[in-house]
Amino acid sequence: LHRLAEHRKACPQTRLILPLGAASVLDPVCAQWLGDALRTAGLAPDSAAIAIEHRVVAANLKQAKDFAGQLGALGCRLCITEVHSGANPIPDLVHLRPQLVRIADVLSRVLGDNESTNTVLKPLIEALHREQIAPVMPNVDSASTLAVLWQLGLSFIEGDYLQSAQPQMSYDFTDAAHVLGMDE
């Protein structure tokens, strides 16, 4: 968080996704601790999106809903990860109201298959859009994959196609944020 705070001095729109495990979701004081840690680092609560795996949410729905409510009260964003249509995630997501959903890595492999894309991925992305949840697709590594995702209306991508991961936060997303309407 301190590195993020330092980076945001030069690039104030930078946001970080912080993955948390089941133990954090089940800990009744974790959200408060996180709020304190953000304040100590001098960060706005919306500078961090807290990521929780869908399997943790599904196994601990009541606690996850409470945790999501605490994060919302703090002003933090919520991201549910490893979401795929086989687990029928939409009812769980409706309870939590995340701002972001990171689609399961395994679904990035179906993008070359039109039938799988249309029967698996497209309905999932459409359902997320109906719930006003921004989908994120990992493992984007080619222009052809990017073209398919663009047609599906995907909100965000991760992967090595645009730029591989770097040891420092050095990519300027200002233009992309403006195009995506996130520069508010």
Image (spheres, rainbow, N blue to C red):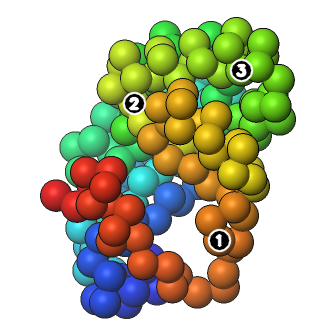
Q: Quadrant of the C terminus?
A: bottom left
Find residue 134 and report its horizontal and vertical position in percent.
42, 36
Dot 2: element: loop
Sequence order check: which comes first, mark 3 or mark 1? 3
**Relative height, residue 24 to residue 123 (above, below):** below
Q: Calculate the distance from the C-alpha at mark 2 to the C-alpha at mark 3.
A: 19 Å
Residue type at tag 2: Ile
Would you name the residue on which mark 1 appears?
Answer: 163
Of the numbered discs in the image, which one, if any, rests on residue 117? 3
Residue type at tag 1: Gln
Q: Nearer the viewer, mark 2 or mark 3?
A: 3
Residue type at tag 3: Thr
Q: Calculate the distance from the C-alpha at mark 1 to the C-alpha at mark 2.
A: 25 Å
Q: Within the image, what quadrant is residue 8 found in?
A: bottom left
Q: Is residue 118 left or right of residue 32?
A: right
Dot 3: element: helix
Sequence order check: which comes first, mark 1 or mark 2? 2
Residue at figure coordinates x 48%, y 17% from the top left: 126
Of the numbered discs in the image, which one, if any, rests on residue 44? none
Residue at figure coordinates x 42%, y 54% from the top left: 49
Q: Calculate the distance from the C-alpha at mark 3 to the C-alpha at mark 1.
A: 24 Å
Find residue 159 and report its horizontal and vertical position in percent.
69, 58
Residue at figure coordinates x 27%, y 60% from the top left: 178
Given residues 20 and 126, the one toward you in this image is 126
Contact? badges 3 and 1 (CB < 8 Å): no
Of the numbered discs in the image, which one, if any, rests on residue 133? 2
Contact? badges 2 and 3 (CB < 8 Å): no
Sequence order check: which comes first, mark 2 or mark 3? 3
Q: Can the viewer see residue 114?
A: yes
Q: Nearer the viewer, mark 1 or mark 2?
A: 1
